[in-house]
Amino acid sequence: MGMIQEFKEFAVKGNAMDLAVGVIIGGAFGKIVDSIVGDLIMPLVSRVVGKLDFSNLFFVLGDNPNNLTALADLKKAGIAVFAYGSFLTILVNFIILAFIIFMMVKQMNRMRKEEPAAPAEAPATPEDVLLLREIRDSLKK
């Protein structure tokens, strides 16, 4: 079988197509989450914290002889900085994304749950047992 034929079979299989659709939807969903975080959540958080831009949150770890205050300038000068602001933004994005995916999977699992099957009727009593019961009952008389 040629490589092109094998690729065609792989590409048209349901699993490969499902994966492709999932990747495309996941990329679009990531943009939605970024917008939710950047436009809705982070402004609320910044209201509490007092800053809107978390990307400039950092600690200077090395000597700062020129008293630079901008993160980009400090990095350009080669001064060691602990830049935690970008990490906070990415962490909030991840937590929100993970929570949304968890809720989606939870709802999908709830929809997939099948109703419990009705209890099966008791199997019919075998004929020999019925005959033995009749004999027992006739002996009791």
Image (tube, grey):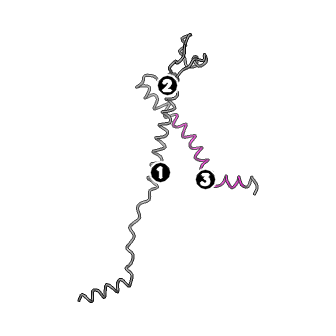
Q: Which residue is mark 1?
A: 108
Q: SS at mark 1?
A: helix
Q: Is residue 140 above or below residue 34?
A: below
Q: Quadrant of the N terminus?
A: bottom right
N-terminal of the pair, mark 3 or mark 1, is 3
Residue 50: horizontal and vertical position, in percent?
A: 43, 22
Query: Which numbered disc flags the more N-terminal residue, 2 or 1?
Result: 2
Q: CA distance from mark 3 to mark 1?
A: 19 Å
Q: Amino acid at mark 3?
A: Asn
In this figure, which residue is indicated by the disc labeled 3?
A: 15
Where in the figure is residue 74, as x and y percent of width and height?
Answer: 57, 17
Q: Real-space Cα distance between discs 3 and 2?
A: 40 Å
Image quadrant for the C terminus?
A: bottom left
Residue 130 pos. (x, y %): 35, 84
- Tell me the element at label 2: helix
Which residue is most to the left? 141
Horizontal placement of 46 versus 11: left or right?
left
Q: In the drawing, does residue 84 fall left or right of residue 7? A: left
Q: Nearer the viewer, residue 122 or 13?
A: 122
Q: Residue at x 54, y 38 (%)?
A: 30
Instruction: Give the magenta-colored segment's residue range.
Output: 6-34
State the count of labels. Answer: 3
Q: Is residue 20 magenta?
A: yes
Crowd tier of the residue under label 1, counting other residues whose Cα lies within 10 Å: few below 14, some 14–19, many 20 or above: few
Residue type marked 2? Phe
Camera-nearest residue between 119 and 74: 74
Q: Please name the residue that numbered disc 2 is placed on.
A: 54
Say whether marks 3 and 2 touch (CB < 8 Å). no
